[in-house]
Amino acid sequence: MKHNVSFDFSGRHVVVFGGTTGINLGIAQAYARQGAKVTVASRKAPNVESAAATLGPNGFGVIADVRDDEAVGAALAQAVARHGPIDVLVSGAAGNFLAAAADMSSNAFKVVVDIDLQGSFHVARRALEHLRKPGASLIFITAPQSVVPMAYQAHVCAAKAGVDQLTRVLAIEWGALGVRVNGISPGPIAGTEGMKRLAPQGPEGDALVRDMVPLGRMGTPEDIAQLAMFLGSDAAAYVSGTVIACDGGAQGQLTPMVTAAARLAQTAGA
């Protein structure tokens, strides 16, 4: 779906963690098209290089695993040395898989919490000294699982609920510095790794998902990018401490999609 909304981020520095694939890459590319200097960060060098190459002459890539606090700090220092203070920071690194709680190891649960929640904390805390104050915008990418309990998603539900609360707390603590903190909770977004993992595939799966969305379609990375640009813009200068669903109205209705995907996976593995 095409959008006719445009923003001007000329001269501003945008950093996107997890910005080399899917929704986060779409956000990085959208900011770059609107004139921003964009740094993408991820843990895999080939992904960083290929993503940065799509961002134009002001694109830059740094390597960091968000679970590694020191690595995050070093990556942010590189980004700031290249492009200056950070105007918009997007924290979007995430992990997910389908697993019943009874079958999930402690380590499997910990991996998702470490990436989604601990990683979000690392990115935010390490970035604080580099954020433009006043005026910076910090955006966490969360998920419907933060508020909607879903079978086979205990790890993600716990981690993303933590991200939502981290969003609200940092908005309180950092507001006096002039830093706005918000979250985006995407619904089903076509062509993403999340949809491959969490939804039945093929025409029947697509129809199942569409039927759960009141607006009657899956979202696109551009849908999320438009909201991210709004939150990073002066138009949202008085918006802080909120988590906004961008899902066509579907967040409370996605549980059957995840359950169907998990059952199909169990059948295939039997």
Image (tube, helix red, strand yellow):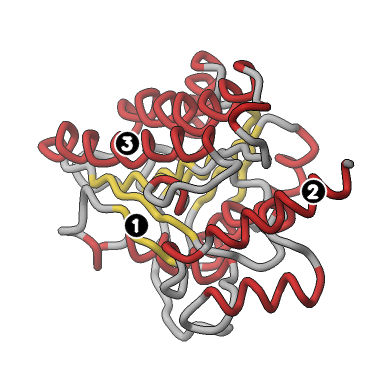
On screen, residue 176 versus residue 88, left or right, reads left
Name the one closer to the observer, 34 or 261: 261
Q: Which residue is mark 3?
A: 131
Determine if residue 141 is in view.
no
Q: Position of residue 269 (x, y in %)?
A: 88, 42
Q: Is residue 10 above or below residue 74?
A: below
Q: Which residue is mark 2?
A: 265
Provide the secondary structure element on which disc 2 rests: helix
Name the one closer to the observer, 3 or 36: 3
Residue type indicated by callout 3: Leu
On screen, residue 259 versus residue 125, left or right, reads right
**Who comes first in sequence, dot 3 or dot 1?**
3
On screen, residue 246 versus residue 260, left or right, reads left
Q: Nearer the viewer, mark 2 or mark 1?
A: 2
Q: Position of residue 24 (x, y in %)?
A: 57, 52
Badge 3, how many Cα within 10 Å: few under 14, some, many 20+? Answer: many
Residue type indicated by callout 2: Ala
Residue type indicated by callout 1: Gly
Residue at x 46% of width, y 33% of height: 159
Q: Work out how far the residue at label 3 is from the one at label 1, CA to CA, in angstroms.
A: 13 Å
Disc 3 and disc 2 in contact, CB within 8 angstroms: no
Q: Position of residue 77 (x, y in %)?
A: 48, 25
Q: Which residue is mark 1?
A: 232
Q: Work out how far the residue at label 3 is from the one at label 2, CA to CA, in angstroms.
A: 43 Å
In which quadrant is the N terminus drawn?
Answer: bottom right
On screen, residue 149 versus residue 98, left or right, reads left
Name the one closer to the observer, 143 or 232: 143
